[in-house]
Image (cartoon, rainbow, N blue to C red):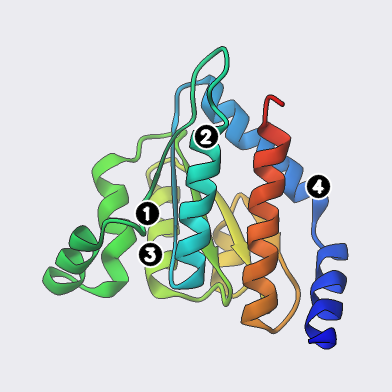
Amino acid sequence: MEGYFNDLSNSLKCLPFNSINQAASVLEKARLSGKNLYSFGNGGSAATALHIANDLSGITVRKGPRFKIQCLSCNISTITAIANDYSYDAIFAHQLGNFIVPGDVVICMSASGNSPNCINALTLAKELGGITIGMTGFDGGRMRSLCDVSIHVPINSYYIVETAHLAVSHAISFILSPL
């Protein structure tokens, strides 16, 4: 247990704070210009993608426009239909293709940075003029180079990476909070 918390503490100290601030700035600009946000990930990252969507939705009760965000990991009937009819690798890209317009923001979380469904969605988002924010771990995988803003946690542990991604999500929400 002590090793886990030491690794977590050391990883949090190594976070790219400039990238976290840049991500918050991108999200605030999207809010003010009425752009849509889309979050997604697999497994524990799906839970964090939903969590940031909840947090951003909850902090928008203030003057001015609200964050317009949806989590693409959450509609199980849509996900399973796309996986069945096309491929699991298409579950996020297919949904994005229905909605994304230039200037919309995609927030993708993948510990390995190599999930094909995340890579496909980020590639489509870039092709369609979206702005991409990615949270990765390990070496960042293929995803790291696809993101306009990359928040990389340089450790080879899913537990630590996913915990750090949740902390980053909370930090972004805190930065954007009107309180």
Count neighbours of disc 1 (C-alpha within 10 A) and say few if under 14, some if 14 to 19, many if 20 or more. some
CA separation in Å, label 1 and label 3: 6 Å
104 is higher (above) or lower (below) than 3: above
71 is higher (above) or lower (below) than 135: above
Q: Mark 4 points at which residue?
A: 18
Residues marked 1 and 2 touching at CB (< 8 Å)? no
Q: Earlier in the sequence, mark 3 or mark 4?
A: 4
Observer-side mark, 4 or 1, equals 4
Image spot of residue 138 (x, y percent): 67, 79
Q: Residue at x 61, y 61 (%)?
A: 135
- Examine the image and state in which quarter residue 59 appears: top right
How many numbered marks appear?
4
Observer-side mark, 3 or 2, equals 2
- Examine the image and state in which quarter residue 12 appears: bottom right
Observer-nearest residue: 109 or 77? 77
Image mark for residue 124: 1
Q: Name the residue under label 3.
A: 120
Give the secondary structure at mark 3: helix
Count neighbours of disc 4 (C-alpha within 10 A) and say few if under 14, some if 14 to 19, many if 20 or more. few
89 is higher (above) or lower (below) than 172: below
Q: Which residue is drawn at 68% across and 24% down?
A: 178
Q: Earlier in the sequence, mark 2 or mark 4?
A: 4
Q: Earlier in the sequence, mark 1 or mark 2?
A: 2
Give the secondary structure at mark 4: helix
Residues marked 3 and 2 touching at CB (< 8 Å)? no
Q: Could you tell me which quadrant the C terminus lies in?
A: top right
Observer-side mark, 1 or 2, equals 2
CA separation in Å, label 4 and label 1: 26 Å
Answer yes or no: is residue 23 visible.
no
Give the secondary structure at mark 1: helix
Observer-side mark, 2 or 4, equals 2
Give the secondary structure at mark 2: helix
